[in-house]
Image: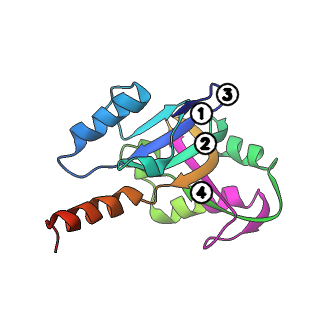
Amino acid sequence: MEKDNNKMFIYHFAHREGESSMCKMEKRSIFGIETNENVLKSPIEIDPNRSPFIKERIEVMYEGADLQDIINQVKKIFLFGLTFNVNLMKYNNLYQLTEVEDEKRGWIAHEVGLHINGKLDRVNPDQEFGITVMDGRWYFGRYKKSKTVWIHHSTYMDLKAGTVG
């Protein structure tokens, strides 16, 4: 865990039924925050792959009052020939986006991507960006999705113990 007061991260948590207390304990242990929310903002940097509950993370580069604020700011990004993709971080308690139909969600990521100086590649981009809304503010930044590496270790241990198969 690394805390950098110049950086801010937005984490999206997800857990199965019956795991909420463990997820809550992890948030408290890592971030020092007691919350039932499945999204949180923190200056603490943790790799999403280190947690079974962190689904994705945005390292905030820009924030704004609305989508147009973000669009104006991403115009500063020059990728010099590199490819990119923009992902919309969406989660259940995100009141601004839960009611938005899937077409509009895709439109948001596409619209932001139109203003980035680089080449769009949705399959194998050099750089992943994310955008989301939290507490009425829009956030944009470097995106990292969890690869759920922990599940492979869990399955291996279950196989070794003879509980799977």
User: Residue 88 placed where, x, y %?
Assistant: 54, 55
At 14% from the left edge and 67% from the top edge, which residue is drawn? Answer: 162
Q: Amino acid at mark 1?
A: Met
Element under label 3? loop
In the picture of the structure, the residue carrying the numbered disc 1 is 8
In the picture of the structure, the residue carrying the numbered disc 3 is 6
> Disc 2 vs disc 4: Cβ atoms closer than 8 Å?
no
Q: Is residue 33 above or below residue 124?
A: above
Question: Label 3: how many residues lie within 10 Å, few (<14), some (14-19) or many (20+)?
Answer: few
Q: Which residues are magenta?
A: 108-133
Q: Is residue 78 above or below residue 132?
A: below
In 3D space, how far apart are the residues under numbered discs 4 and 1 (Cα atoms)?
22 Å
- Towards the viewer: 95 or 29: 29
Q: Which residue ends up furthest to the left in the rendered image?
A: 163
Q: Earlier in the sequence, mark 2 or mark 4?
A: 2
In the picture of the structure, the residue carrying the numbered disc 2 is 59
Q: Is residue 99 above or below residue 34?
A: below
In 3D space, how far apart are the residues under numbered discs 3 and 1 (Cα atoms)?
7 Å
**Which mark, by number, is residue 108?**
4
Q: Amino acid at mark 3?
A: Asn
Element under label 1? loop
- Towards the viewer: 155 or 45: 155
> Disc 1 vs disc 2: Cβ atoms closer than 8 Å?
yes
In 3D space, how far apart are the residues under numbered discs 2 and 4 (Cα atoms)?
19 Å
At 39% from the left edge and 47% from the top edge, which residue is drawn? Answer: 51
Element under label 2? strand
> Disc 4 vs disc 1: Cβ atoms closer than 8 Å?
no
In 3D space, how far apart are the residues under numbered discs 3 and 2 (Cα atoms)?
11 Å
User: Residue 111 placed where, x, y %?
Assistant: 67, 59
